[in-house]
Amino acid sequence: MSALKQFFDKLLVPQGPAEKFDFTGNSEFNTCFIVSLTDTGEVWKVTIENDHLSTAGPIPGNTSKLGFVLDTAAFAGITSGKLSVQKAFLTRKVEIQGGLFKGMILARQLEAFFKKLSAHQETTNEAAIEHEFAEESIKVALDDGGEISAVLGYDDNAAPDSVIFIFPPHPMLGGDYDNNVVNQLYGAAVNSGKFAVKFNYRMVDNAHSDDEMLRYWRNLEERAEFERIVGDARELAWNIMENIGRDLKIDFAAYSFGNYIALQTMRHITVRKYIGISPPLLEYDFETLFAEFPGLDFVISEKDDFCPEEQFSLMAGKYGMRLHKVNSDDHFYRGSEAELKQSCLNILENKHA
């Protein structure tokens, strides 16, 4: 029996998991997508109606519709909850077709569903990333009773008066402090002799389920209200300054959606140096922020549908921004992490012209 048939047959039995578990917490959620297995050639179309899996069955061949292309082993790892969709995508174990933005959001929703099916809460068996420097875990209590998690990294050469805050991408698109790009920024910052702080946004922690996180952030997106998130970042920075030193020189680094939060946070905190990576120009109003903070450094991928080079070059000329290009084939820098890290390190050490 094929892996797809075996999996969906178990889900779609009467009174089975397909009826018990929703996907997003939104009863009006409807979508369809395909799953294409590269090693067997199978292609299945899956339909979600009213936030529950309704049908799944084979179709003659692949289409251009929204879908996921992977092999049987990766499919088994994801559906068992042992392999996170984010890890699978970043390591090229799965490819998304028909629209990366929609595909990444759907992938996170599917990941939340698969977690419900698994008997444990771990999303991956891969070893945690280890760094060759000291780290401290930090919990910051927020003024409304919430909490955010952060990690402070430093080595023996860290300047006691300099710290850089690293803003992750959107939680619905794999945004947390273990993101591949965030970790490159983090490593580059410590290597340049700074205290480095990477953090998660609110609701991105073990205290909240993926369902809760996705529901909270979907509501923020629908209302386009991120003042609370900017306030959280401000509280985090003040907390670190209180504990390390009030006269700290503050730097910011941000990736993707993190730029939108970091630039707004700069309205409240004086920042010496800023490194932005691939702001999603087509999703948010960045031009207003670029006008407020001209002359910043940005690293971009040469091929990025979310941050088109031609459009960004025009803005860079208008607002005096310095662009640094990395040879990467998309927004996620998969396989280009080393080049990205070196580019960021050059900016931090003022080695770029």
Image: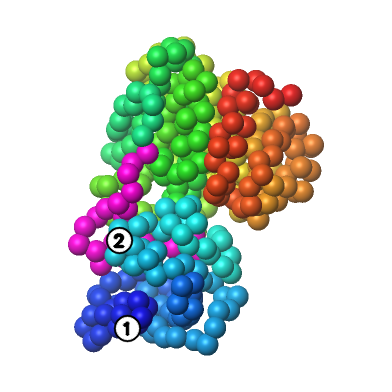
Local crowd at mark 1 within 10 Å, few (<14), some, or many (≥20)?
few
Magenta-drawn stretch contains 126: yes
In percent of width and height, residue 271 lies at 56, 23
Vertical comparison of 17 with 115: above or below: below
273 left or right of 222 in image? right
Q: Is residue 83 visible?
A: yes
CA distance for labels 1 and 2: 21 Å
What's under tag 2, amino acid-wise? Answer: Gly
In percent of width and height, residue 136 lies at 31, 26
Which of the labelled discs sits on residue 1, or is there none?
1
Q: Residue at x 58, y 65 (%)?
A: 99
Which of the labelled discs sits on residue 302, or is there none?
none
Vertical comparison of 275 with 105: above or below: above
Looking at the rendered image, the disc whose residue lies closer to the viewer, 1 or 2, is: 1
Q: What's the magenta region?
A: 102-129
In percent of width and height, residue 101 lies at 55, 60
140 left or right of 194 in image? left
In percent of width and height, residue 304 lies at 65, 52
Task: Say how the picture is coloured.
Answer: rainbow
Vertical comparison of 226 with 212: above or below: above
Q: Residue at x 54, y 41 (%)?
A: 337
Magenta-drawn stretch contains 35: no
Return the residue at label 2: 81
What's under tag 1, amino acid-wise? Answer: Met
Which type of secondary structure does the marked residue at label 1 adopt?
loop
Which type of secondary structure does the marked residue at label 2 adopt?
loop
Q: Residue at x 69, y 42 (%)?
A: 287
Q: Residue at x 46, y 59 (%)?
A: 93
140 left or right of 284 in image? left
